Amino acid sequence: MTKVARETDESAKGRILRVVVATWFPDDPDRPRGGVEAVSATLVRALAAIPLDVTVFTFSKSVRTATVQQWGGVSIHREPQPPGSMLKLARGPGRRRVAAFVERIGPDVVHAHDTFGIMAAHLSRPRVLTIHGFIHGDTLVGGGRYPRIRSVMWRRAEHEAWAAFPFVISISPYVRERLSGIARGRIVDIENPIAPLFFDRPHEETPHVIFSAGIICRRKNTLGLVEAVAHLHRRGIPARLRLAGGTTEPPYLAHVEARIKSLGLQESVEILGPCGVDRIVSELEQAALFALVSREENAPLGIQEAMAVGVPVVASNRCGMPYQIRDGETGLLVDPEDPADIAARCAELLGDAGFRRSASTRARQEARARFSPEVVAARTLRTYRMAAEISG
């Protein structure tokens, strides 16, 4: 029996827990948009297979009245998302609606994700929080109006929530570091799961193709990656960059497109726009390397998905990314503010087929051990049982 099977079997000896997962959940569970939706759908499906009595609560802009969907044995309750800012929702109507729903369902445990942690922080029931990002930090590097003021407001709300939860799931050592002195409950280390279809894929790289998946925005530093491709071309390396993802900052996207044109890279850089999971998998299967040079990240799924497919990674040497790859073994770390450094590391990987093969093998092995849904679900269930037992 495997370690995961033993953990699941031991957890299953007790009664089946009733859990409400309060999170951002995709309108189509098989086509998530964004990291939190992808993690939530993958985790919920794996938890339901244990088995576990799982009910999802979420807000959606696509519904006008509350709806209930049955998906793989899971009830998904969607309520219309009220207008206004996300912080206003989290501290006002969202908090009231989550409380009313939890009171009606009466679960053994509430598992809140992302901004739903602010909404569920005051509940008296056993509860667990997974932190997917630091919104106050993202606000500072994301631009927009009055970023410092908005960052201070988010910091206060986030810190209050982190301190209120008896159990906090840390998806990266970087998150654990940031929680130091703030979280008062128990911190449990559980990395995010990725969808099963990323495992055991063929990987037949196309020479010199660099693939990147993520929202095109300042925080993701898309422009830095474009500048790195220009450096590679000056060195005589015919790199081709394929960028998957929409944008939350249209002016920034326009700036990136203008820079591509001014650098004469129209034939070498392709912006694919928003891509579904199947397209992401297809792109990874053909990529020589995956690159993500963000200024701020916790544990981006793009890196984990690339590792599962066996694509060597070039990633930023800051925040949570150094904990995802092993520098010199499953990929290389770079200074995101230095396009020349990004280009040099990409050139190192593109020019060494032996390194790429060994990095591919190691990445696949690590991804299976760390990010498979079965592993993550078993560890999450153990956390639910601890939360329920302590509160009981």
Image: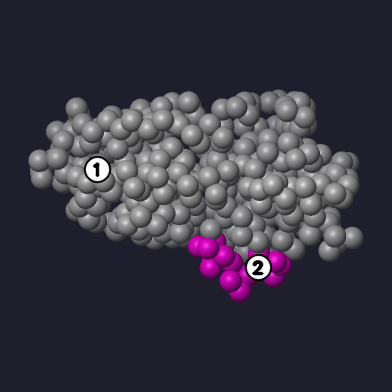
- The structure residue drawn at horizontal position 85% and vertical position 60%, both measured from the top left corner, is 389
Residue 336 position in % (x across, y down): 31, 55
- Camera-near label (1 vs 2) is 1
Which region shows up in magenta?
A: 173-187
Seen at 53% across and 63% down, the residue is 173
Colour pattern of the rendering: one colour
Q: Disc 2 residue type?
A: Ala
Q: Measuring from the top left, give residue 51's x and y in whole percent.
A: 78, 39
Q: What numbered label is drawn on residue 353?
A: 1
Along the line of sight, which residue is nearer the eye, 172 or 121? 172
Q: Secondary structure at mark 2?
A: loop
**Residue drawn at point x = 41 percent, y = 30 percent:** 202
Residue 52 drawn in magenta = no
Residue at x-position 63% and y-position 36%? 41
The residue singled out by tag 2 in the image is: 183
Give the residue type at disc 1: Ala
Q: Is residue 180 above or below residue 360?
A: below
